Image: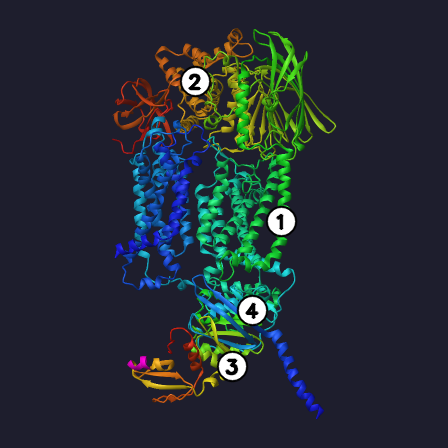
Amino acid sequence: MGGFITLIWIAPFAALGLKKTQMTEMALTISGLSKTYANGVQALNNVSLTIRTGIFGLLGPNGAGKSTLLRTVATLQEPDAGSILLGETDVLRNKPEVRKKLGYLPQEFGLYPRVTAEVLLNHLAVLKGITNKKERAELVKALLYKTNLYEKRKKHLGSYSGGMKQRFGIAQALLSNPQLLIVDEPTAGLDPAERNRFHDLLNELSATTIVIFSTHIVEDVKELCTDMAIICNGKVLLTGNPLRAIEDVQGHVFSKVIQKNEFGVYNERYTIIANRLFQGNTVIHIFSKTTPGEGFKPVEADLSDVYFSKISGAPAPVQKLY
Amino acid sequence: MLFEIIKFELNYRIRQYNTYLSFIIVFMFSIVAVDFIFEGQPDAFKRNAPLTIAKSMGIISAFLLMIPSMIMGTAVLRDFDHRMEALLFVNPVKKSDYLMGRFLGSLVILVFIFTAIPLGMMVGDAMPWHRADELIPFHLWHYLQPFLFLVVPTLFFGGCLFFVTGALSRSLLIVYIQGCFFLIVYLLAVNLLKYPENQLLTGILEPFTFQTVRITTASWSIDDRNTALVPLTGIMLYNRLFWISLGMLTLGIGHYFFTFNVLADKTSTKKKYAGKTQDKNIPGYVPGPIPFASPDAGKQKTFIQLFHTTLFSFRSIVATLSFKVIVLCGMGVLLINSFNLNTGYGVNNVPASYLIAGELIELTGLFFLAIVIFYTGELVWKERDSGIDPLFDTLPASNLISLGGKFLGLMLTLILLFFTMTGTGILFQFSHGYYKFEPAIYLAAFFIEVFPFLFLLGVVCFVAQVLVNNKYLAHLVALIFIGICTFGCRLLGIDHGLVTFGGSLLTSYSDMNGYGHFLQPYLWFKTYWISFSVLLFMIAVLFSVRGADTGFRKRWRQHRALLITVKRISMSVLIVFIFSGGYIFYNTNILNRYASRSTQNTFRAEYEQQLKPLITQRQPRIAAVSLKLDLYPGQRKYSVKGQYLLFNPGQKSIYEIHIQKLPVDEVKLEYLAVEGGAIRDSTYIRFGYYILKLEQPLQPGDTLKMEFIQHFTPAGFPESTNTFMVYNGTLLDNYHFPTIGYNHDLELEDPTIRAAYGLNRQPGRAAIDDPVALLEGKSNGDGEEIDLDITVSTDTSQVVVAPGSLIKRWTQQARRYFHFVSDEPVSNFYAVLSARYAVKSEFWHPGKENTALEIYYHPGHTFNLDRMMNGMKKSLDHYSKHFTPYRYQQVRVAESPFYSGRGQAFPGLISIAENVGFIMNIDDETDMDMPFYITAHEMAHHWWGDLVNPANVQGKTMISESLAQYSALMVFKKEFPAEKVNKLLRWNMEHYLKGRSEKAIPESPLSLVGSKQEYVHYNKGLISLHALQHYISEDSVDKALQRFIRDWNSYTGLKKQYTGRYPTTNDLLCYLRQVTPDSMQYILSDLFTSVILYDNKLGQAHYEKTAANQYTITVTPDLKKIKINPQGNEIPTAINDYVELGVYTKDKEGNETLAGIKKIKITSAHPTLKISVSQKPAKIVLDPNLLLIDKNIADNEKSFGNDPL
């Protein structure tokens, strides 16, 4: 009996202890981050997030501030206010330290066209601090092998296809066994097969790494992420587990087929979270706490409903579902 | 549509700040352009003369070629740069409309920008500080005409070239490289000028028209040069038409090859093409662990990273196409220009290593400049240009590594080029039969003379790129910075090496003296500036752009983390900077006195203002000199104990003796005393001017002894040093030791500077009848004929050479002593040389006496010793026979470092600089034997200058130099075939014409030649005296010269002794008149007392066979005789002269021989002349013996074809 009580007493502390060590070693804490560009656009508005090991999905429409946030975390930009901690390292004040632990795959990047993959990766590895020649050669070889560029390692990067360039980007991001891996809209230019392979790779890495994965495609998050945030107009609208988020809206999403010209009327009366064309008519999804009647049918909610319910609630033009 | 595109282009450009910035740059540059293009030419033509304007405009537009390349190169290129091409090219625009629209729009803007040239020049000329006599009245057309005819066509062609290369290559660097095209064509054109018959070709080919203007105006009179417009006719017109049509052709080619494709199809030729479709079916990622490589945390990490970045940057530069093109262009320039080993004597030097290294540096300097300026831009922007910056910016390597590595990579590129150049130079030497392998000289030349400058330039460019943060603007900023540092500071009169960026250049290498004592201060200055540049570089490191933020405050905040490292480096560099700066300051300003140029000018102006009035005080003359000189070449020190015997040549007693010490800080006059005692008046001591008030006046005809002790002791190093004492090759002449009275040589010369101090233009040489100047010879009245007794000691490694017989030579306490005594009086123009000499000695036997001939030369400089020895012997033979016997027991020729740059004749001693004669490369087949000629010329000074000492008045150098030229020519003529004599005459004729076209002061007749008219007394003197002996025979001239020597020589000449004055050209002309027949008397006036030019053309000529073995040639020449009046204007004059026609025949091998020559008296400008010869004529030449000075000798001959008429 006493043993049991002890166990009850100890368990939460043990759990807490475990959690604490994880937090100190493996969490990225963003607090109160704001950034306004010179042209008046507020890209980040008091963003606070805590991101742990695993894949963190950052979902938001184009221009939501995702890239600004990621660039700031990746030490490439200074915020106007706020702080970022990686474990106990202040990201904004101790960039060199963070850069040692960082892997970054930007949304857009170029490569030197007249250099081979092997040479450039080797050069980047040196600058990552891997100065042991033998170790570096092994690493470069392994990464090229892993990203399936090994065959083409002696080719000029100028001749690489978009997918190959992306894979090279991943290879370089993994150079120093990153504790923090930032991938900014990586699947935008990839075909479905390549996207799946990429997801597999991220999944493999997520066991030991904080992966921040930004996208405007809901499916990506649904498939990959254990944790997510929806960001729009520089604000965090939602954070949490994607499944739990779906549960929150489950039972509150209804759909109806309406005439195109009726859209205005419905838009006034309901919170339309999405609309799409279906055989010439319009299918609308609405969010409602109560059953709306009027021919609305309840539908099985998915992450896109969560996403669109969130961003349509935001003070911005209504997003269209495509 | 075309119009729309033009409008769009104009609108776009009008909104670009570049347009206005370029305009302002051109404008500012044009305001001061004339000042620095014609800087340091004291007797320049009028500042706003149309010719000056035209020349300046050509030079400005060449200098600012960068602007057309930026404007025109980007007209199409920017669509690709901004990735707009896909959006643009899908529009229904015709290719020709697009191209022409862009081209015309940009061209209009370009011309607008360059209208800043005439505007700027007008403003520059209107500046209030120009003196009225520098200007002619304002005419708008004087500015517009050259702008429209010279600048606009150049802009058009340049525009076409830059536009087309930009559109086709889509790389701005390739556009910039077209600048090399201009350079190569220009050099090609200039190179063609080596042969005068290529003038037309050069005139047409030269893209900027400076040579074309020069060729068209070569024979212009001073009046024309000050007022006439350069006409758009002849060569000038052809040149402009040629370049305009070439521009159109370029446009056509561009239009043909330009495709409206979105992507340049570059991949098709790539070997390393990866194949885009092959990877579809293979898995993208292979699962599995990644090996863990631990990042290095140690110190060596930084160095390994730096090393890698250096190599990576180096490889990336070397791999680019543009680099290869630049290197090819550089090699092209080397190939075209080859190595200019020209000596200024019409023959080449041997390809000595230091000459080749110097040539390599000079020829490729511009390319190094271009490489540094352009590739800093490419390197700093390397990541951003290819979009890879987000990957690099998140790497943990610091800015110090990335920027530092790039900088070192660039330096490594330069070093690679240096080594390549060394290889090229050595190959060139080997292929020209110079087998001394001296890589150290090359490496020293590159790494000591050039590399520090390029290093500094590189830093400036890096800093500019980082701070300006706009690649192209930064190129310009860097150029402007360099411009300000070099010209700007000079214009402002700032010249201390601690302030002028980079410090001064290193004095060139001398085979004899190496870099001498110049090296140490040079290295200190470079240390100082390099440490300064490292500090600058640290600023670049702190502010280099990383990530998305480009604001300065953000950049600063980003790199705070680096501050500790930067501080540590900066602190240690700062210590070096402060220490070296302090050490330099201690040396230049505390141990030595620093005088800026303006301080020196003030000193010289005050010297003249305060001391010139004292010139009326009659001074004694030196009658004997005795020196005990101890040289310490290793320490650059000497001390001398001297004694002058002074005598009073006048009719009145002398109460004061004025002594001038050489006004150089190292020279200290420690002791100065006269026999009988004197009171020293030190009023003017700051000028080194001592007045000794004699206790007992020096009575007429009396003598007294003066004694002095003088030291030369350098302390540390001054800001700018002198070449009096050097480690090897010291040359001290009599002016180095105390002189008597006021010294004219210290006066300011530049009339503009003189005017600023309220001084009038220097009067030039005294009038031929100036009674005071007639009493002075070449030593300016310090005493002309002296007894000389010199004892010199020096290091045991060196040998001393001085005039006089070497009566004793001994070694004592590890020093060598030499005692020279003159056997009979010599002229007061002596020198002491000390160097590590080798000696070649022979004897000349003029009967019973032996005259020792010795050449003291730098070991290794043995190329021309035999020629010089031969020159000495043949001159002694000739002059002793034709003039008078040689006066001394020996002739010594001694080599001196190139600092003096000339040959000088002292009594029995000739000093010849190492770059004159000793290292000439003479091909006996083709070249004139100039070492022989130069030796003969200097030998002749023993008669003309030493034996006969001309009065210090107008025409003085006709007696000393023209007669020496004539004498040497006569020796040369005896020794070498007629073709070589002809070559020598031709060469002198060309130099005379070139020389007279460059001077704004009206030319004097030979008999009244003034100072600074070398082209008259050397070049014209030779031609004129040669013509005289041709007309009246050599014997007659010799007879006159013998009488002249007999009566006027300084030692026994009766007239000299009777009058007490020195001879003038009037005296010489008397003797010449005596030996000239009445019919030829006119020639004396034409040759010597007036300035006569001809502009003769052979015109029509044909021949017919009049009998067996008789051919008659008929010519109708066009003859013009021109007299130059004292104002410098050309006055046509009636012709009434003897003119020669020469007919040449050709044998089976094609050798030409003279078949007949006829002297004809001509009295009309268009005579018809006949000449008969017995062989088939191949060529007829007007004036084959070059008796008349003809503005253009190229049109004086005609060759006949093979077919007989």
Residue located beneath label 3 in the image: A241
Q: Earlier in the sequence, mark 4 or mark 3?
A: 4
Residue located beneath label 4 in the image: A84
Q: Which mark is residue A275?
A: none
Kindly identify which chain the residue marked by label 3 belongs to: A
Inspect the image, locate mark 2, and give the three-letter code of the amino acid beneath it.
Answer: Leu
Does dot 2 land on a helix, a strand or a loop? helix
Tell if the residue under mark 3 belongs to the same chain as the one under mark 1.
no
Inspect the image, locate mark 1, and give the three-letter code of the amino acid beneath it.
Answer: Val
Badge 4 vs badge 3, beta-carbon distance below 8 Å: no
Residue located beneath label 1 in the image: B573
How many residues crowd around disc 1 within 10 Å: few (fewer than 14), some, or many (20 or more)? some
How many residues crowd around disc 3 within 10 Å: few (fewer than 14), some, or many (20 or more)? some
In the rendered view, tell whether residue B838 sits above or below residue A312: above
Tell if the residue under mark 2 belongs to the same chain as the one under mark 4.
no
Where is residue B625 shown, x and y percent of the image?
Answer: 63, 17
Kindly identify which chain the residue marked by label 4 belongs to: A
Quadrant of the image occupied by residue B712: top right
> Mark 3 or mark 1, which is nearer to you?
3
- Please name whichever residue, B235 or B489, is drawn nearer the observer in this view of the structure: B489
In magenta, the rendered stretch is: A261-265
Tell if the residue under mark 2 belongs to the same chain as the one under mark 3.
no
